[in-house]
Every structure is written in structure tokens, then in C-alpha cells.
Amino acid sequence: MARALIVSANGAQNYQECQSQGKRSIVTFSHPFDDTSVKASLTAGIQSIRFLRMSETSMTAWPGVDRFAPREPMPKEQAEPLSREIANLKRSLNAVILAHNYQVPEIQDVADYVGDSLGLAQQAALTQAEVIVFCGVHFMAETAKILNPNKIVVLPDKDAGCSLEESCPAGQLAALQRTNPNFWTVAYINCSAAVKELSDVICTSGNAVKIVEAAPRDKDLLFVPDENLGEWVMEQTGRPMTLWRGNCYVHVEFQRDVLAQMKAKYPQAKVVVHPESTREVRQLADSVCSTEKMIAYCKSSPAKQFIIVTESGIVHRMQKECPGKEFLCPPVFNAMRAPADPCHCSECKFMKMNTLEKVRDCMKNLAPRLELPQQTINRARLPITRMLEISAR
Ligand code: 13P
Ligand code: SF4
């Protein structure tokens, strides 16, 4: 097995194990990496480079695919004993289970609260429980810890990261901030605690427009790390911002032409898009919003069919809360997969690292546990509480 750096046409990048001739290789599509300095930084430390043409990639495995079926829940006979164990542990620990809308169905079903990043941060700020079991990705559990420094916060898999968080190292942000003392830094919650420490205010996809509208008028806004969300917020607010060049590796893989084909095939369907998607995809939407607002939109809309342009785990809640309605998942380009893997589902591999067994185990062992230096907690709490206060207005 060798490591490959796979770079999509949209610029999302990721390392992956893959078969090759025993040396590390890089697999890329030439557009938009004609810039030699970008290429040099991407290829640093890579021993051997192999460029693939589009025709050599899994793109060729597409014909006839206009949608894919979202993941099935774990079989009942497997899920039920685990769920019972988790319920008992929850009582004995005085724990609360918070889960993001992208978690696997069986985790959503044992959670006390399932929601978007904003709802989860609000729940974490309010909880009376002694232990928080956070089923999402690492930065979300970190936020819960920052809001609850004296509580135990555990997470099923400590390696559940986020491509947005990875794209914005705190040192690089600090260097950019030094170039303009008038910057006011708005950080999307999908970032590390160290980036939160450097930020003036945090936002989520559910409140980003409100947060940016509330930002001081005399400041130069710097939005990190999601360039697509930032661009959408600029469109909504009319406020210019300097955008960090980060993106979500799942959402940038949705393709406008695939979505257009699905719209043509299902003309009655409403298209609901997460703002981490690219502008050309957002332009085809009936609604652009956070995952929680997507669910609310599908509930209140008289439409019976919806094309869901986000991570497919959300469909579990939609099916539960909108009986009689149909949710269609468009396939993604999926440059992140090894070329031989034909899967085109829109799953976030980080969100899917959590399993029901790992939820049980983290409660049993009270580990992995989220710990942060007190100084980080103190500094990062300010922009988070500022967000919660603006959001509640
Ligand atoms: P939401 O806050 O809209 O749920 O988004 C979180 C996320 O990670 C999207 O990829
Ligand atoms: Fe991060 Fe994208 Fe996964 Fe959300 S879906 S956690 S933004 S990588």
C-alpha cells in the first residue's frame, strides 16, 4: 500500500492509501493546479508522482447513476442490545448524548439531541449532565468542552477530523492576521480550538449571515476557513470579506451537471443545498441552508420530493420526520476515493468513523476524552459565547 495525494478538480485534497508501485504517488487532475507554486507545495515530500487523466479515474464508473441509496441502519438484532447498554450507561453516568445530523442512523436513534452545529453548541451550553458524549467530529466535541470545562466530554473516535479544520493551521492564520491589524476574524465553527482562540467571533452555517451582519462596520472582515460558505455569506450580506481558501471535501464534490440532470428527471423535486457547496451548485437550489434548516424546509414544504445536496446521513432524520416524502441523494464526483472504488455516495468519512460500538465503549471507558489547556479554553470561549449571544438576539 502506498499513500496518494488525491486532488479534485475543485481543489479539495486528501491523502489516501492506494495501490501503486510501492512508492508514494500523487494523483491529480491538472485543472486548476497549473500554478507551479501550488503544485510544489502539494508535492513536497512525495517521492513519486503519477498524474491520472479523468478517463482513468472512477468517473468512468458513472453511466446510469442518477442517485444513490443512503446507508441502511444497523440490523435491529445488532443495534438493540448495544442501545440498551448505552441507555444504562447514560443513566449511571448522568450523561447526555449529542449527535450531529450526519451520524449513522443507529447513533441518531440513541441520542438525546440530534442537530446541526449551532443546535449542538446551544445544547452543550445548556446541559446539566455530568458527562457529554459527543457524536460528531473533533471540533464539535472541542466546542462542547470549551463551553463545559469542568465536565467530562468523550467522543467515540478521537480521529474524526474535518477537511475544513485541517485546511487552516493556526500559525498560518496568525501570519495572515499580522498583515492587517484591522482584520475582524469570523471563524466558521469547523476549525480547531487554536483557530477559535485567534478569532473575534465564531459562526455556523445556521447563523453565519446574522453574525456577519452584526460585525463592526469599520473592520475588514476575514472569514475562515470555508471559502464557499464565506462566498455565500458575502452574496447574502453584501459585505466584502477576505476568504481563507479552505473547503469541505464532501460538499465540493457535488457537480452542477449531475444536479441539473436530476432536476430534469425529477422536475417536481425541490433542491436543498448546504452552503459549503460551490456557487455553481448553489445556483440550482430552491433553498440554501444549514442541515437543521434543511430538515425544517422539507417538513414545511408542500413538495413531496427533495434532492438533498449534503452529507447523506441527514436523510435518516428527514425520513423519520417527514413521512410520505421522498429524499433523493445526488452522486458525487468523489475524487477522494481510490480510482478503483466506484462508490459515489456523499458520506463524510470523518462523521462515519463513529459507530454504535464506539459510543458504548467511550461511555464504558470514559475515553477517548477531550482535554484542552485552560488558556485555550479561556481564549476560545470568548468568540463562541459572542456567537451564542448574537444568535439569540
Ligand atoms: P451544519 O452546522 O449545517 O450541520 O454543518 C456542519 C457540517 O459539518 C457541514 O458539513
Ligand atoms: Fe468537515 Fe465536510 Fe465532514 Fe462537515 S462534511 S465534518 S465540513 S469534512
Image (tube, rainbow, N blue to C red):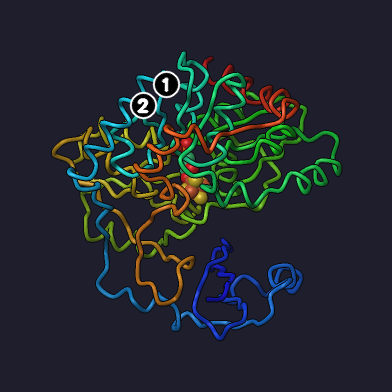
- Circles 2 and 1: CB atoms closer than 8 Å: yes
Instruction: Give x and y (percent) for residue 262.
Output: 28, 59
SS at badge 2: helix
SS at badge 1: helix
Write the residue at 46% across / 60% down.
Answer: 253
Instruction: Give x and y (percent) for residue 309.
Output: 37, 50
Q: Is residue 385 above or below residue 189?
A: above
Q: How many labels does the image show?
A: 2
In the picture, residue 3 is in which quadrant? bottom right
Q: Give the residue number, with chain letter if any, for mark 1.
A: 93
- Mark 1 is on which residue type? Leu
Write the residue at 57% across / 68% down.
Answer: 7
Which mark is on residue 21? none
- Mark 2 is on which residue type? Leu
Residue 166 shows in the view: yes
Q: Give the residue number, with chain letter if any, for mark 2.
A: 89
Apparent side of residue 58 relative to residue 305 in the rendered image (left or right): right
Apparent side of residue 190 relative to residue 37 in the rendered image (left or right): left
Viewer-proximal residue, 235 or 337? 337
Q: How crowded is mark 1: few (under 14 residues within 10 Å), some or many (20 or more)?
A: some
Q: Is residue 305 above or below residue 47?
A: above
Viewer-proximal residue, 274 or 93? 93
Residue 275 shows in the view: no
Q: In this view, does 53 lie above or below 332?
A: below
Viewer-proximal residue, 22 or 4? 22
Write the residue at 30% across / 54% down.
Answer: 329
